Image (spheres, rainbow, N blue to C red):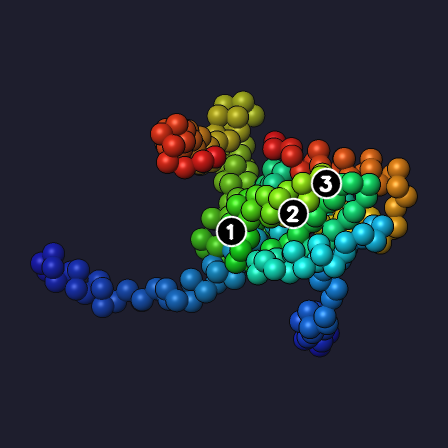
Amino acid sequence: MEKEQYQQLEQSVTPKPPYFKNAAKAFFVGGIICTIGQAVSLFYIIFFDFTEATAGNPTVSTMVFFAMILTGFGLYKRIGQFGGAGSAVPVTGFGNAVISAAIEHKSEGLVLGVGGNLFKLAGSVVLFGVVSAFFVALIKYILVTLGVVSW
Amino acid sequence: MMLPIVVCMALLSGCTEKEKFIVYGPPQNEEEVEAVLKEEKFVERTTVIQYDDKMLVAVQFKPWDKWKKAKLEKKLQKKFDEKYPNKDVFVSADYKIFYEANKIKKDQLEDNKLTDKISELKKLAQEET
């Protein structure tokens, strides 16, 4: 069998991924997570001295904390299976990535296993976040200095 | 069984007409202030608190205008500063400030407590961390 023939056969046999269904699921799961996030944010605004501008920080940490607990109990993977990118793109995906790596490497010991692999997946998120934030801030600083935009 | 009823109630509760422009404090120029705010199309709800020669203007913008919140806030602040040059006006579009302003109105705070509360709110609104 030629290579091209094989590819044709393979394409005819593989089931078509339900793109639209997946996108819809991701949309709703992501939307529900964000609604919970909004509720947490409102909770901090109403019951604590946070404004709309400052409530973001405690909200993010609370959402990551929720995701970590759900991961620990093995519930987040079910949400992930159903929602796909909808559960990975919000900040809760970060908590899941940290804790799932920690659970996976627990057998290798606490220091080299858990400690060394805790940021195996999430490390890239932190790294690229920090680096891109640096460059965006640099570009904005240059633009402000040139007088194109204001802060 | 219960869920559709709850959803319907939640949706319908949005239909009741709420008081959208509130001015609280000693009656001075309530209607004038209200007119100034009603002029702007991007303002959805406001609560204004007047005391001494100071004024706290808490506004909520319409959903699509929230993208330009900082800009519109500044615009409104400028407008009030020009209109009332001898008053100390503080404009904020933050939900926290709006919520607290409504709470002040509801609780009918005393004058000395009011001043403390509002200076506290101003400090909160300017915090950036």
Q: Residues within 10 Å of mark 1 (few under 14, many from 20)?
A: few
Query: Badge 2 is on which residue?
Result: B83
Q: Amino acid at mark 2?
A: Lys
Q: Which x, y percent locates residue A93? A: 51, 45
Instruction: Give the letter of the chain under mark 3.
Output: B
Co-location on one chain, circles 3 and 1: yes
**Of helix, strand and loop, which one carries label 2?**
helix
Q: Work out whether A11 lies above or below B58.
A: below
- Tell me what residue is drawn at x 22 percent, y 64 percent: A11
Q: Amino acid at mark 3?
A: Lys
- Tell me what residue is drawn at x 37 percent, y 36 percent: A148
- Tell me what residue is drawn at x 90 percent, y 43 percent: B110
Q: Which comes before the other along the chain, label 3 or label 1?
A: 1
Q: Is residue A112 left or right of residue A47?
A: left
Instruction: Point out which mark residue B88 bears.
Output: none
Instruction: Give the letter of the chain under mark 2.
Output: B
Q: Work out whether B75 lies above or below A27.
A: above
Query: Badge 1 is on which residue?
Result: B67
Instruction: Give the letter of the chain under mark 1.
Output: B
Label total for image: 3
Q: Could you tell me how far apart the alpha carbons at marks 3 and 2 are, in whole angstroms?
A: 9 Å
Viewer-side residue, B69 vs B32:
B32
Q: Which x, y percent locates residue B129? A: 61, 31
Image quarter hosting the N terminus of chain A: bottom left
Query: Badge 3 is on which residue?
Result: B87
**Of helix, strand and loop, which one carries label 3?**
loop
Q: Work out whether A28 lies above or below B54.
A: below
The answer to whether residue B69 is visible is no
